[in-house]
Every structure is written in structure tokens, then in C-alpha cells.
Amino acid sequence: MTTQTLSSAPPAAGTAGAGGRLPLLDVLRGAAILGTLMTNVWIFAAPGSEWGVLTGATGSPSFDSFPQAVESVLRLLANGKFLALLTVLFGVGLAIQYASAERRGQPWPGRYNRRALFLFFEGTVHFVLIFAWDVLMGYAVTALLVARLLTRSVTAQNRVMWWLGGLHVTVMLAATAFVLADSGTDGDGGGAVLDDGVRELYAHGSWGEQIVFRLENALALRMEPVLTFPLLVFLFLLGVRLFRAGAFGPDATGRRIRARLLVWGLGLGLPISVLSSVAGPELFLLDRYIGGPLTALGYLGLIGAIVDRIRRPGPLMNGLTSVGRTALSGYVLQNVLCMLAAYGLGLGLTERLGGDWHPWWVIALWTAVCATLMLGSSWWLRRFSHGPLEQVQRWALRR
């Protein structure tokens, strides 16, 4: 997995726009990066932050007041959706690199294994130093497997994709049934209580103390990519399949595929997410890991439909494109900025602006970080061809 996979890569001949690129892919990557932040920003803003996800401290959807309703709707629209979209795009990037190696007659996976291992190293550093819910480590491991699968027949790839997709749905349904049964036997039906020490750690603790906490609880904090590994492989292979079918091209074929994704993705995914969210926290797995991926395909189609109708890109479209071209740098930088803004080691806004300021300060933080990424990436790309972390990655792999 390289910078090309996360941000930009030359697509197959005959499918790209000017400059050997598929413009829609950059816009989709930018939207996926900023949309993933829309999920993560609520984690940074919750008491206990990263650990609060496991204990339920990030809160459940509530419509008892207008501020709570605003927060619930925003979290519903983002939870698992943009992360799934980003995962599909990783698969697209992998397909692009495989096609490039095939055209050049290069062995596969060949050097790609080193790139995936380097991504795993980057994800490990990101997990330890910045944010426990890192996605790069899981993507790197998935890429190693899917890269091998690309050397097999299309029939074999489809068989693996659908078998693992079915396994994922079965596991999520079984886990949800277990949670429902367990909640039915609880005497008080209450959720877990956040430990005061963890709350204090993120409100006033040092950076070093947070690093030690992540390392001590690494197994629990790294459980999501383990449990959702079948989904990761499924979405990677789905991205490969969509790319080969021409889903991202500007022609009639691409528009037809995206229109279908829009209808089926939003038509199935959003109702599942809405119903599971309204029903209660016991159906969280259905929202994030079943409704989320389906809705992500709808978002793909929706963004594609919007881009198709834009004749002259404005600041928003250019900003998304720039973020998409520097996606690795943007993903890491947005988490650094949120850490410095929310935690006690920085501005400590989670502790200072609770109560009446919630959720407005969280929305303002998300908006400010998005604007920073779009403006900063646009400025950077006017001077350099790749993002800062992308350049470090390219240098390290050349060495």
C-alpha cells in the first residue's frame, strides 16, 4: 500500500481524464477523508476519547433536544459510511497498481509487499503516538492478502469476496443477537461507566501517559480491524471489481454504474442505519458494519452524480481534489489537529466546552479542520507534486 493507493495513481489507459488521472477518484478520496473525520471528531470530543468508544461514553443517538438531534443526525450520516468508502477506494488503488505492473510486465506483488509493510509501520506509529482507532494497520494487512488474490482468476476473487461478505453479515447478526440477549438479562439495563482515571487521562494527562495507555490496552483498541477483517477484504475486492467495471470513468458506463449504486446504496443502507440507530445502542453493529458499507456505496454514487453535473469546479471541488491527492497526509494531520484541540495536552476543549457548548464547538472544530486541510493541501500542491507524508513514503521506499 503506497501513497498512490491512498491518494493518487495512474489508472489504466483509456479510462483516465487529463493527465492520466480519474478526477472523480480524487474527489471521492477527499470526501472520504473529511467524512471519516466527521466520525472521529466525536470520539476526540467525548470524555475518555478513544477508550470511551468501548465503554459507550461517546453517547447514543438522542432526539430529546435540538442540540442532541443535530449531533445524532451528523453522527448517523457519518458512522461507518465514509470509512467504508475509504476502504473501497483502497481497493481501487490496489487495482490501479496491479494494472500498472501488468502493463509494464513487472512481477506481482513483487515490491508491493514492502509498500504494504511500510504502511503497517506508518499505521503503528499513528496508533501509538496519535490515535488508537487507526485504519492504516488493518488496510496494510488486508492489502497483503488481496494483492495475492489479484493473481488468481476473477472467479476465485469473486468467490472469496462473496464468501467473506456473507461471513461478515452472519457474524454481525450473531453478535447483535448476543448483545440483545445480554441486555435483556441485565438488571438495570445500563451501560458501562467510564473510569474516572481514563477521563482524567485525556482531560489533563500528558502525551507520554496517553501513549503508555494505548500500549497497555492495544489488544482491546485494535479489536475492530480484527473483527471486521472479512469486511475489509470484501470492500477491497469490491473496489477492484468496480474499477475494472469502469465505475469511476466519465463515460456512460461509469454514470450508469454510479446511478445504480446511488439508488441501491442509499435505498438499503440508510434505512438500516436509521432504524438500528433509533432502536437503541444494542443495534450499533448493524448501523456501522452493515448499514454503513451499503450507504457508502450510495455516497459514492451521489458524489459521482454531483461531480457529473459540475461544469466549472469551484473552491469546494478543488479543495476536495487536493485533499484526495494528499490523502495520507490529510488523514494523519486531521487527527493531530483534533488531538491538540480536544485533549488536555493541548487546548483541552473537551473539558472546557462541555455542556451548553456541545455539540456546536465540535461542529466548529470539524469545519475548521476541513478548511485547514483543503486550503493547506491546495497550497502545498502548488509547490510540490506529492503531500509531505507521501514524499517521505516515496523516499523511504526508494531507499
Image: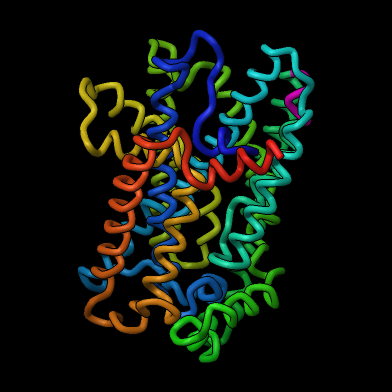
Q: Relative to 26, is 142 on the left or the right?
A: right
The residue nearer to you, when weighing 217 against 65, is 217
Picture residue at 56% right of the left edge, 87% below the top: 187
Picture colour scheme:
rainbow
Q: Relative to 114, is 278 on the left or the right?
A: left
Look at the image and tell me in which quarter the C terminus lies: top right
Q: Which image quadrant for residue 296?
A: top left
Q: Residue furthest top?
A: 14
Asked whether residue 133 is in view, the answer is: yes
Q: 380 above or below 303? A: below
- Residue 97 lies in the magenta-colored region: no
Residue 7 drawn at (x, y percent): 50, 36
Picture residue at 22% right of the left edge, 80% below the top: 356
Q: Which image quadrant for residue 320?
A: top left
Q: Relative to 92, is 325 on the left or the right?
A: left
Q: 268 above or below 274? A: above
Picture residue at 38% right of the left edge, 10% below the top: 252
Asked whether residue 166 is in view, the answer is: no
- Residue 152 lies in the magenta-colored region: yes
Residue 266 drawn at (x, y percent): 39, 38
Look at the image and tell me in which quarter the N terminus lies: top right
Q: Which residues are magenta?
A: 148-153
Q: 221 above or below 332? A: below
Residue 191 drawn at (x, y percent): 51, 80
Q: Residue furthest bottom?
A: 196
Picture residue at 24% right of the left edge, 22% below the top: 309
Give the tally of numbered discs: 0
Residue 119 drawn at (x, y percent): 66, 47
SS majority, magenta: loop
